[in-house]
Image (cartoon, rainbow, N blue to C red):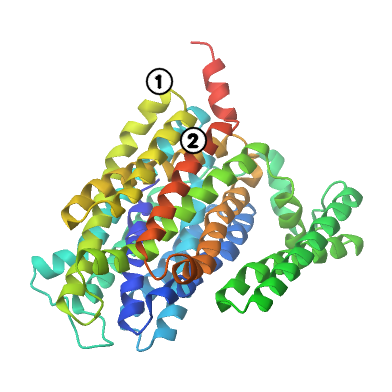
Amino acid sequence: MSFGFLGIQFGFALQNANTSRIFQTLGAQPDELAAYWLAAPITGLIVQPVVGFYSDRTWHPFWGRRRPYFTAGAVLASLTLCLMPNAPALWVAVGTLWIMDASINISMEPFRAFVGDLLPPSQRTAGFAMQSFFIGTGAVVASMLPYLFTNWLNVSNTAPAGIVPNSVKYAFYAGAFALFVTVMWTVFSTREYPPQPEHHDALRNRQKRKIDNEEANTKKLFRTGIALVLTGMLIGLLVLTQSVEKELYVLPGGLVLFGLVFLLSAIYIRQQRSYLGIVHMAVDFLSMPRTMVQLAVVQFFSWFALFAMWIYTTPVVTRYFYQATDTAGKAYNDGADWVNFLFAIYNGVAALAAFVLPVLSKYTSRKITHLIALWFGGAGLISFYFFHNPQWLILSMVGVGIAWASILSIPYAMLSGSLPAEKMGYYMGVFNFFIVIPQIIAGTVLGFMVNHLFSGETIYILLTGGFSMMLAGLMSLRVNDRDEVKIQKRPA
């Protein structure tokens, strides 16, 4: 059931470890990287809830509910993985990242709902931990591929200026193959439960199913929409008057866009068109379970830290540990290869920690387990500032790996028990908002922070990420874990 995540993580790991390298090879400056990376979270923000919403309403006797989306995403993602390292210009690479991330998200989002669909509450921690294991295993191999091609197969890790080295290209080709094969394995080796009788009519008549409490929801949508539009316009005016980095416009632009979606949904309700998908998505968004809202804060600070790490580890390691800034030079590419190795380390640790986390949560709680793991990760990122030998960064990645295993499993296990079964896919997609929104904010503010707060010293971004992850750990103690309460109260 989770084997396809092995291949999906090939795609994400290659993207995370090599995108900054490819962008810099094609001419991007360090303070521009965060803005170029915005393509990835923006696509996730749009794609995941839409895929989740429609996968909840999909059923085919052979393909099932989630597996059609696995298949479509795998085909598109494999093609874009082959294109990414061959991009002839920076703008092509940024556009390819946009398409690649959207394609991977099409496959990935239904996998989260897949576990919630098929496993009872008592098995969900183990189920999501198994996903973490496959994610970690796939990412270990994928992150090490450029290093292995260079050091084991003597494939060159350097190339003329503006050309991505062959070691990176071959790694992406191997990743495309692995992603397609493993996802197809899950597609053809699993079966899904047909819809429950009470949901069958809703699936069959989904185009004309109206929402409840139309008047109350209309008022709620109008209030929220107006508040978001006004807030976005105010922030946008502030950015305009300060004449700062142009990527800061993304945040107010997003607020205005979401506000308009809510206002449009309210208008559709007034027009007796509340059966439309956009209306259902907007109303369900404003009716999120309490546990989901609490986890949103935890996810925000966790993923802000991770995005800072993915963007700036390559510039930090190459500059501060290898004293290199020339992207065509051997020292820079040796440092970039070491980043791939370090990313393999944290993913390998995550694969092993995935087996320990369910045991630890059994004897403590899922909240305490998540707190401990995130504090290990925060300490790992902060340690970059204190280490001077690149070999010592392996210890840093051990801490990050423990946090990564928990981030990929514990929040989803806590969340799934609070979600209605008929909306599992949609809410899993909406939960991705609290992964990509911090990434978008990171993409809009990290470049500003590098230039205006840290005087170009990118190492301080990793420090910021470390403290953010520790704060996320503290916030996890506030989460109402409904599934865990049910399991604890169950008689022996």
Residue 288 in the image: above or below residue 156: above
With 489 as the anchor, is 350 left or right in this view?
A: left
Q: Position of residue 423 (x, y in %)?
A: 65, 46
Q: Which residue is mark 1?
A: 363
Residue sitting nearer the eye, 340 or 426? 340
Residue sitting nearer the eye, 247 or 285? 247
Observer able to see residue 184: no
Q: Which residue is mark 2?
A: 119
Q: Position of residue 394 (x, y in %)?
A: 21, 50
Secondary structure category for the residue under label 1: helix
Secondary structure category for the residue under label 2: loop
Q: Amino acid at mark 2?
A: Leu
Residue 455 in the image: above or below residue 143: below
Tell me the quarter of the picture where residue 260 sits. bottom right
Tell me the quarter of the picture where residue 86 sits. bottom left
What residue is shown at x 28% (from left), y 56% (from top)? 343
With 115 as the anchor, is 27 left or right in this view?
A: left
